[in-house]
Image (tube, helix red, strand yellow):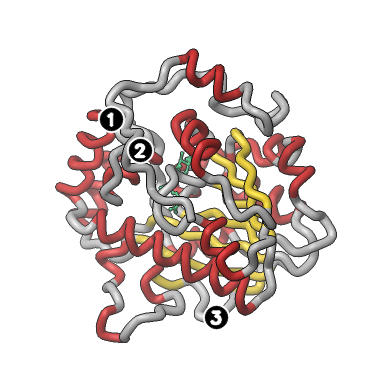
């Protein structure tokens, strides 16, 4: 089983040379949709994958990510709990998809830096031949993912460097197209990634493009940051931080806005709920309250 990377902490960013070497590895995607391979890692600005890694207790982050993470923590002190709850939602929803709904291939967009229990590990533990296509636009995720997300020999785990803000191009990636079996249902995962798309990025249009490409019987699971559970002061402070631009793009959405993203799809029980309340598998009295998760989760059947 792949373990979290605790040794390769980037106290210095990987050089452009190391990125170039990485891109020459066997299995690297064709140069048709690459989002980040040509852009060097910018360690001076916070990035969502590395800040999330910081909140999860990882070491794959830079000072700018930690500073931004600490600023957010001052406003939302439960953010590390929220990150863990989001991971737990990912694990439960993937388990449900494989074990109970028979899904054996996944398109996981917004992979994040490898940590414990990544999508391929959860899926291949139940179904070793499961196939997973990971997609992210962060050059550091690219470097780590190719090295660590190796997967079960009976299955397939591939990594695609592409951007959710252009789903149509993402879907044209040659490696993605070769890995997905287009006559079998797919588990489309959009876990904690859509709130990095502003309204100008047209998240609904991107989701529609993905959904329209999915084979019959597919599902989409998503989690999305919200301020619905916060008091007005916290909501205003988080909105001001987002508006400042200092922490990168961020757009919390209300329940109605999240519902609109999946309009027309058939929601699987329990519908759109705080991530901690989506089919919890522990004792009832240990379910984390919504105001500590700040995040909705849902699973919907595509058709
Ligand atoms: C908060 S992490 C979530 C990781 C994982 N899905 C999870 O829930 O544990 C968000 C991830 O989305 C990626 N991301 C953000 N914007 C993206 C975009 N426009 N296209 C592709 N990936 C994006 C980030 O690089 C990061 O790895």
Q: Nearer the viewer, residue 100 or 172?
A: 100
Q: CA distance from mark 3 to mark 1?
A: 39 Å
User: According to the image, label 3 marks what residue?
Assistant: 269
Instruction: Name above or below for residue 93 compared with residue 257.
Output: below
Q: Nearer the viewer, residue 25 or 262?
A: 25
Instruction: Name above or below for residue 19 compared with residue 102.
Output: above
Q: Position of residue 40 (x, y in %)?
A: 46, 18
Instruction: Name above or below for residue 220 compared with residue 5.
Output: below
Q: Could you tell me which secondary element the residue under label 2 belongs to? A: helix
Along the polypeptide, which appears first: circle 3 or circle 1? 1
Q: Horizontally, is 254 left or right of 266 in the view?
A: left
Tell me the number on the disc at residue 140: none
Q: Position of residue 94 (x, y in %)?
A: 55, 66
User: According to the image, label 1 marks what residue?
Assistant: 62
Report crowding for label 1: few under 14, some 14 to 19, many 20 or more residues within 10 A (C-alpha). many
Q: Could you tell me which secondary element the residue under label 1 belongs to? A: loop
Residue at image location 36% in from the left, 22% down from the top: 13
Q: Outermost residue toward the bottom?
A: 284
- Give the quarter of the image for residue 129: bottom right
Q: Could you tell me which secondary element the residue under label 3 belongs to? A: loop
Quarter of the figure with the C terminus: bottom right
Q: Do the residues under discs 2 and 1 have CB atoms within 8 angstroms?
A: yes
Q: Is residue 190 visible?
A: yes
Q: Position of residue 174 (x, y in %)?
A: 76, 36
Q: Nearer the viewer, residue 12 or 46?
A: 12
């Amino acid at each position: 089983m792949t373990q979290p990377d605790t040794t390769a902490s980037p106290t210095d960013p990987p050089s452009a040379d190391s990125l170039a070497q990485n891109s020459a590895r066997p299995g690297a995607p064709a140069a048709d949709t690459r989002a980040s391979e040509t852009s060097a890692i910018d360690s001076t600005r916070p990035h969502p994958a590395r800040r999330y890694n910081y909140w999860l207790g990882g070491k794959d982050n830079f000072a700018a990510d930690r500073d931004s993470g600490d600023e957010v923590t001052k406003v939302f002190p439960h953010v590390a709990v929220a990150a863990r709850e989001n991971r737990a939602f990912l694990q439960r929803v993937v388990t449900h998809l494989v074990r109970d709904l028979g899904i054996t291939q996944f398109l996981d967009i917004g992979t994040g830096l490898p940590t414990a229990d990544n999508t391929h590990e959860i899926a291949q533990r139940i179904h070793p031949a499961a196939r997973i296509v990971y997609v992210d636009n962060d050059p550091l995720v690219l470097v780590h993912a190719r090295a660590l997300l190796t997967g079960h020999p009976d299955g397939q785990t591939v990594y695609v460097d592409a951007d959710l803000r252009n789903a149509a191009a993402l879907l044209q990636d040659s490696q993605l197209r070769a890995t997905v079996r287009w006559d079998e249902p797919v588990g489309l995962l959009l876990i904690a990634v859509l709130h990095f798309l502003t309204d100008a990025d047209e998240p609904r249009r991107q989701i529609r493009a993905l959904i329209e490409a999915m084979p019959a019987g597919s599902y989409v699971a998503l989690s999305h940051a919200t301020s619905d559970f916060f008091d007005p002061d916290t909501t205003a402070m988080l909105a001001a931080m987002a508006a400042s631009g200092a922490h990168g793009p961020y757009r919390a959405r209300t329940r109605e806005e999240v519902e609109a993203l999946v309009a027309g799809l058939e929601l699987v029980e329990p519908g759109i709920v705080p991530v901690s309340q989506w089919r919890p598998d522990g004792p009832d009295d240990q379910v984390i309250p919504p105001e500590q998760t700040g995040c909705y989760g849902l699973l919907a059947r595509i058709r």
